[in-house]
Image (tube, rainbow, N blue to C red):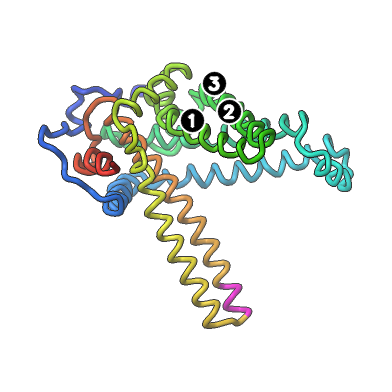
Amino acid sequence: MNLEEKIPTPSVSNTGSFSQVPPSAPLKIGKLKASRMIVKESWNILKQDKELVWFPVLSMISSLVALILMGILFFFIVMDGDIHALDNLKESGMNVLGYVILFVYYLVMFFITNYFLAGVYIIVQGRFGGQNLSLTDGINGASRNLGKIFLWSLISATVGVILRIISDKFKVIGRIVASLLGAAWGILTYFSLPSLIIGQKSVKESFRESATLIRKTWGETIIVNFGVALFFGILMFFGLALCIGIAVLMPVKGVLILVSVLFVIFMIAITIISSVLGAIFKLALYEFALTGNVPKGFTSDLIIGAIRSGK
C-alpha cells in the first residue's frame, strides 16, 4: 500500500472519520477558553503521532543550514570576499540586487517551511482517518508534492518582495499599506497549503478554495484561529517574567547563565510544539470548512462555537 492509498479523501459521507455537526446551536466559547481547548485537543492528536515534532525541528535545522550556505555565497559572490563591501551595500540601500537577494532568501525559507508543514498535514490527515502514518510517510508525501510546494513558495516569495518594495518606496504610508495587504494575503491563503497537499488542488484552485472557505465560514471571526498563538504567547510571557524575577533576586553570573540557557531551551520547545499544534488545528478547520463535519478527536463546540465566539 502506497502513501496515496493511506491518505483518506475528505468526504461528507465519511462518518467513520468525522463526527456530524449537531443541528443545535453550539455553546458560546470565550477566546481564552477556546485557546485552552484548541491546545488540549490538538495535543491529544500530537500524543498519538509524536513524530510530528520532528518536522519543525528538521525545518529549523534546514533553515539554519540554508541560511549559512546563502551567507557564504553572498560573501564570496556579491561581496567578493571583502567584508568592507558590506558598508557600501548599507549606504546604497535596497536596489535591484538587494531585492533579488531578498527574493532568493524568501523563496528558500518559504520552501523549507512549506515542505515540512506538508509532512505534518499528511500525517495528521491520516490520523483523522484512523491511520497511523510514520515520519517517513510524511516526508515521502511531501516529496511527491515538491512541484506544488515550490510553485506556492515562489508565489509567496514574489508577494513578499512586492510588499517589501511598497514598504520601502512609500515610507510610512507604504508600511501601513504593505501591512494591510500582507494581512489580507495571509487570511485569504490561510488554507492554501492544506488545499494543495490534502485537497490535491492546483495552485490556482487552492487559492480560490482557501478564499472561498474563509469568506463562507469565518469572515471576521478568523481571529480565533490564532488560539494556539494566544495560549503559547501567555506561556512565553510568564516564562520571561519568571526568568527576569530570578535574575533580579539572584544576580549571580552562574545563575544568570543557567537561566538564560534554560529560557532559550524553553523558547525553542514552545516554538516547536506551538507550530505543530497550530498546524493540527488548521487542518481540522480545513476539514470542517470543506465537509461540514468535525474531524475525529475534536469537539463540535470547539470547532463551531469557538469560531463564532470571535464576533
Secondary structure state at the residue bearing disc 1: helix
User: Is the C-beta separation of discs 2 and 3 under 8 Å?
Assistant: no
What amino acid is at disc 2? Val
**Image side of residue 32 versus residue 18, left or right:** right
Q: Residue at x 43, y 66 (%)?
A: 238
* Residue at the (47%, 69%) spot, across then down: 241
Q: Nearer the viewer, residue 305 or 257?
A: 305
Quadrant in the picture for residue 289 = top left
> Which tag, 1 or 3, sits closer to the chain's start?
3
* Three-letter amino acid code at the position of disc 1: Trp
Q: Position of residue 181 (x, y in %)?
A: 52, 32
Q: Residue at x 23, y 38 (%)?
A: 304
**Labelled pair 2, 1 in contact (Cβ < 8 Å):** yes
Q: Secondary structure at mark 3?
A: helix
N-term-proximal mark, 2 vs 3: 3
Residue 242 in the image: x percent, y percent?
46, 71
Task: Decide: few, some or many residues near mark 2? Use Cα within 10 Å; few <14, some 14-19, many ≥20.
Answer: some
Q: Residue 147 has which mark?
A: 3
- Residue 159, labelled with which disc? 2
> Separation of disc 1 and disc 3 at Cα?
22 Å
In the figure, residue 296 lies in which quadrant? top left
- Could you say whether the residue bearing mark 2 is in a helix, strand or loop? helix
First in sequence: mark 2 vs mark 1 = 2
Query: Residue 104: image x %, image y %?
Result: 68, 31
**Prevailing secondary structure class for the magenta stretch in the rendered image:** helix
Q: Is residue 230 above or below residue 101?
A: below
Residue 185 tag number: 1
Magenta residues span 253-258
Q: Where 13 falls versus 237 (above or below)?
A: above
State whether residue 175 appears in this view. yes
Residue 120 lies in what quarter of the image?
top left
Q: How many marks?
A: 3
